[in-house]
Image (tube, helix red, strand yellow):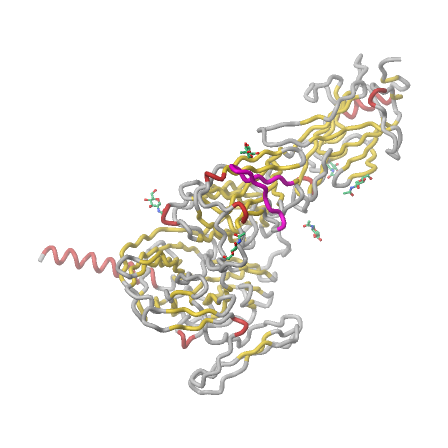
Amino acid sequence: MRVTTLTMMHMSVFLLLVSSASASHYYGGFLTFTPKGLNPDGSLTVEILYREAYRICFPYQTWYCYSGNCGITTRSVTGQIASYSGPSYSWCQLETILIKNVPTDSPFEMREASCCWIYAPNNNAQWNLFAHIDLGTRSDTGKPNSSPVTTILPAIRVPQNCQRELKLLAHDPDADVVRCRYGILPNIECGTCYQHPDFFLDENSCTLTHFPTAITGTHVFELVLEDYPEQSIGVSHRDGTQLPRYPWTSYSQTTTSSPWQWFTSTTTSTPWQWFTSTTTSTPWQWFTSTTTSMPWLATTTISPPSNALSSIPLQFIVQVDQSVPSCADGEYLPMFQSPTPEHGKIIYAAVNYELAIKVKAAARFSTLTNIFISGPLNITKVVNANGNTAEAVIKWTPGSDGFGEHFPVCFVAESVLGSSFYNSEMRCVVIVVGHTTGEATVSCNEMTMTVEIEKASIPGLNDGFVRLKDPLCTLMSNSTHIIGTMSLNTCGTEIEEDDESIIFKNEIVSFENTSTIITRTSELNIGFSCKYPKKGKASFSFTVHKPPYVFTENGFGTFAYQFELFTDRLFNSMVDPSAYPPQVNLGEMIYMQIAATSPILNTVLYVDSCRATPYDDPNYPVFYSIIENGCIVDNTVVVYENNNTMYKFGMEAFKFIGLHERVYITCSVILCEAGNHTRCSQGCVNGTATPAPHYRRRRAAITETSSHFISQGP
Ligand SMILES: *[C@@H]1O[C@H](CO)[C@@H](O)[C@H](O)[C@H]1NC(C)=O
Ligand SMILES: *[C@@H]1O[C@H](CO)[C@@H](O)[C@H](O)[C@H]1NC(C)=O
Ligand SMILES: *[C@@H]1O[C@H](CO)[C@@H](O)[C@H](O)[C@H]1NC(C)=O
Ligand SMILES: *[C@@H]1O[C@H](CO)[C@@H](O)[C@H](O)[C@H]1NC(C)=O
Ligand SMILES: *[C@@H]1O[C@H](CO)[C@@H](O)[C@H](O)[C@H]1NC(C)=O
Ligand SMILES: *[C@@H]1O[C@H](CO)[C@@H](O)[C@H](O)[C@H]1NC(C)=O
């Protein structure tokens, strides 16, 4: 009896927790599935992954089988993905992975339903999650379908007065077309199924746009993701049924039992038109927008009935906060900066090799507090939030279970100003886990990068079917190696930069023999890069001419810069190096030019600092600042040309006080990726670099002791 009583006490505590977790505490969720193969007994293994968010970290997540045979769960793992606590709300996102053994390949449906959503207007608090899973064999790939993969931060902030886009991740491992729509009530895909008039959901791109007409507060979104094949296919099952599956655009249902029809409008302003069914049992209303400004304003939109390969839920909230003084990214709202990967980028990773992704965000008028991440279990992040910037290093080591799978990762940066909290855009990437890498060597020089792959290290490598990022760039090979050489500008090479380096990236991918069956996933992806230090030096002296100065670091690669003297402001005739050291009258203009010896497309040359010293040592304690942190310090400096590859300037000659007759000028230059958010585009940064007054006095003193030569030789 005692034992029984104890058990019951545990039970009641448990139930209490359950009810507190379910009362107004739901923040949305989603489910995805991945077939993991056929078992010897004919059953199928499928991995079901779901993430749900609640106000507290309580794993109250139980999906049940709604229709068909959902099989039995053979393994289950639950863990915490991310959590947040801030004004208006706090949440905890949990993940469960179920490994299921399913006896047949017939479609089945899973469902979870409970109460309550966190409080939101236009929401009845009830929630439903619903997934349609079909493990039949696709006629195009010969394999069962995988659902789209996605993830999301459970709550995203937008300021009331800004039109903002939320790009939902809708990536499909089978390369199908993924569409996003609102859930519909008769399909039990949602609790309230409210379609927000002040948000527009672009069903093709899965982008949710917030218009400044929305009221502040919490907005609940109950969406459905569906995948459609690119071409008409069949999905066949062992029980003999074959379901035709059509691409989205050619879909037209004409059977009498479901009298749906929709067609494409040919006008550009309203490209889609749907119309109303008149049967009473399915009283859907299709809607047509006619306004030109917001052609998609969704007042009564309901998507056509599904003919998708799979349907999965995606539910979350958008928190509309008070207005912000400026909607521009990077002012109050944090903005992602290089080297943050672009939204939707595919990143390849190898089993048991650690992958690192760097994310950086900045805001001029608010303080960065954190970068939130929703990614696979065991992904780690180290966030360094420091004033107006925050950097996160996201690390993850895929296990062998993940081989071949696609893992989404989404991140959002948050900043604060007073009592206002601001979110950046949400960005998502997809990590594809493949084979461990083979043997490749990369060599970098000033103009080119060369990659050599040892064929023996990659079994089955077909050297006739590999190319660089640009499909026109094929590779050469000999009996042992595949060799690719490209200039830093060609073959689809991309430029990235971080604080220290400028990085040129390309990749070797395999392509298909077009006369065989199309398989759309690439079997080979070897990324390679050349890393060059961004900061170089160009030196020049009045007395000693030097050949181009080459600055090397880490042995990755180098760029050279030239620093030359010209006779006049037209920069037509260079002072002949054999005539060095030049003689200059004090107070006379000297004309100097700095150039990168191998100008690279999409990069910008930036002269950060120039210093004059009496000896050939830029760190000599006696120096005179000409340019410091991009700010012109010497008031005789005239800049004649400052473009991406060349910096031409002049200044009045001077001499150091004392007996130093020679003047050496050393400039530090930076090469940046072209764009608005680099050190190069910032220009003069007025910080600690303001010249100390005694340098100015020294300059004045020099000017006064006029008519001396800086000279050497005759
Ligand atoms: C996460 O890490 C733990 C401990 O390091 C490990 O036992 C578990 O298998 C990992 N989970 C996944 C999904 O990799
Ligand atoms: C193939 O090319 C690589 C790289 O250039 C070279 O190291 C190797 O010796 C070559 N092999 C043969 C058999 O020529
Ligand atoms: C491409 O595939 C076709 C048909 O399978 C085959 O005849 C042809 O030889 C293949 N081409 C190459 C270059 O392998
Ligand atoms: C920069 O200026 C130089 C000299 O005027 C010119 O030759 C070069 O084409 C310019 N480069 C760009 C990118 O405008
Ligand atoms: C830089 O910003 C301007 C205006 O903000 C914009 O027009 C331009 O396209 C941007 N350039 C790049 C390379 O992002
Ligand atoms: C830099 O700071 C000084 C002193 O604080 C100021 O006089 C000058 O105008 C500033 N220059 C720029 C370009 O902001």
Q: Quadrant of residue 131?
A: bottom left
Q: Does the magenta stretch include residue 483?
A: yes
Quadrant of the image where one finds ligand 2: top right
**Is 586 placed left or right of 322 in the picture?**
right
Residue at 81% across, 34% down: 648
Q: What stretch is highlighted in magenta?
A: 472-486
Residue at figure coordinates x 66%, y 44% from the top left: 490
Q: In the orientation shown, which residue stands out farthest toward the left?
A: 1
**Residue 540: x, y in percent?**
76, 24
Instruction: Estimate the x, y position of residue 144 in percent, counting from the top left.
Output: 39, 62
In the picture, residue 604 is in which quadrant?
Answer: top right
Q: Furthest-right residue in view?
A: 707
Residue 306, how many percent across, how many down?
45, 73
Q: In which quarter of the image is the N terminus?
A: bottom left
Q: Is residue 674 magenta?
A: no
Give how far across and how far down residue 209 sits, in percent. 57, 64
Q: Which residue is drawn at 50% across and 61% down?
A: 318
The front one of 170 and 325 is 170
Quadrant where the image shows the C terminus? top right
Vertical position of residue 229 compared to residue 540: above or below = below
- Residue in front for this viewpoint, 310 or 470: 470
